[in-house]
Image: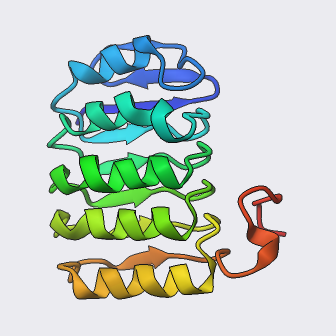
């Protein structure tokens, strides 16, 4: 199994690459991802990957990871524009995806809906975590509607908690009490 795990302390790969993860989607991290086409697990949580245009290179790299089964981008301050790019450009190409964690970001209703639409081709998706993203009650309901109307017969665990209370807004303390 090939995997890459990154966090505030650095990144390691079963394929042999290791080193510090730069703040944001820096050239070192993107260069490593570009040659890891066989990657099956990618954990870039807690990396402050950023918002909107800053994540375009990450999205481009993800489109090349056709074997990816698990993707964790939690706690990265991803906004609606970043989530929309991910949903429109990368997720439709990740047909092998089984687990997706985008919790504790700032994608809002529009970003959540874009992610749900982008997952239509991920027929084998088993776990989806969108907790604490500021989706709101309407956004959470729409994400559920989109997922149910798609091809997600294998979805066993969809987590949307913390998206309906104003205390859970992206700029608030997003950790549950």
Q: Is 154 situated left or right of 17 in this image? A: left
Q: Please state the horizontal and vertical placement of residue 163, each as a whole percent of the image.
A: 64, 75
Quarter of the image with the N terminus in it:
top left
Q: Which of 127 and 73 is in front in this view?
A: 73
* Residue at 56% from the left image edge and 40% from the top image edge: 51
Q: In this view, does 45 lie above or below 167?
A: above
The answer to which image quadrant residue 7 occupies is top right
Quarter of the image with the C terminus in it:
bottom right
Q: Is 165 situated left or right of 153 in this image? A: right
Q: Nearer the viewer, residue 27 or 109?
A: 109
* Residue at 54% from the left image edge and 76% from the top image edge: 160
* Residue at 23% from the left image edge and 78% from the top image edge: 152
Q: Please state the horizontal and vertical placement of residue 64, each as a whole percent of the image.
A: 18, 34
* Residue at 30% from the left image edge and 77% from the top image edge: 155
Q: Is residue 1 above or below residue 116?
A: above
Q: Is 15 situated left or right of 135 in this image? A: left
Q: Which of 176 and 143 is in front in this view?
A: 143
In this rendering, does residue 69 appear at all? no
Question: How many discs appear?
Answer: 0
Q: Is residue 76 above or below residue 176?
A: above
Colouring scheme applied when the structure was drawn: rainbow
Q: Please state the horizontal and vertical placement of residue 138, each as a whole percent of the image.
A: 55, 86
Q: Please state the horizontal and vertical placement of residue 61, each as a whole percent of the image.
A: 28, 30
In this rendering, does residue 7 appear at all? yes
The answer to which image quadrant residue 65 occupies is top left
Q: Is 164 situated left or right of 143 in this image? A: right
């Amino acid at each position: 199994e090939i995997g890459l795990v990154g966090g505030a302390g650095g990144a390691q790969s079963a394929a042999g690459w290791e080193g510090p993860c730069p703040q944001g989607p820096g050239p070192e991290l993107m260069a490593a991802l570009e040659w890891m086409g066989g990657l099956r697990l990618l954990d870039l949580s807690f990396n402050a990957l950023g918002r909107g245009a800053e994540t375009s290179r990450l999205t481009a790299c993800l489109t090349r990871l056709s074997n990816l089964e698990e993707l964790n981008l939690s706690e990265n301050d991803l906004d609606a524009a970043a989530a929309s790019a991910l949903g429109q450009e990368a997720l439709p190409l990740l047909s092998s995806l089984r687990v997706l964690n985008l919790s504790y970001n700032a994608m809002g209703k529009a970003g959540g809906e874009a992610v749900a639409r982008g997952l239509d081709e991920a027929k084998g998706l088993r776990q989806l975590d969108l907790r604490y993203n500021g989706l709101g009650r309407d956004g959470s309901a729409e994400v559920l509607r989109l997922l149910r109307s798609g091809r997600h017969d294998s979805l066993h665990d969809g987590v949307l908690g913390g998206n309906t209370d104003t205390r859970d807004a992206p700029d608030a303390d997003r950790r549950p009490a």
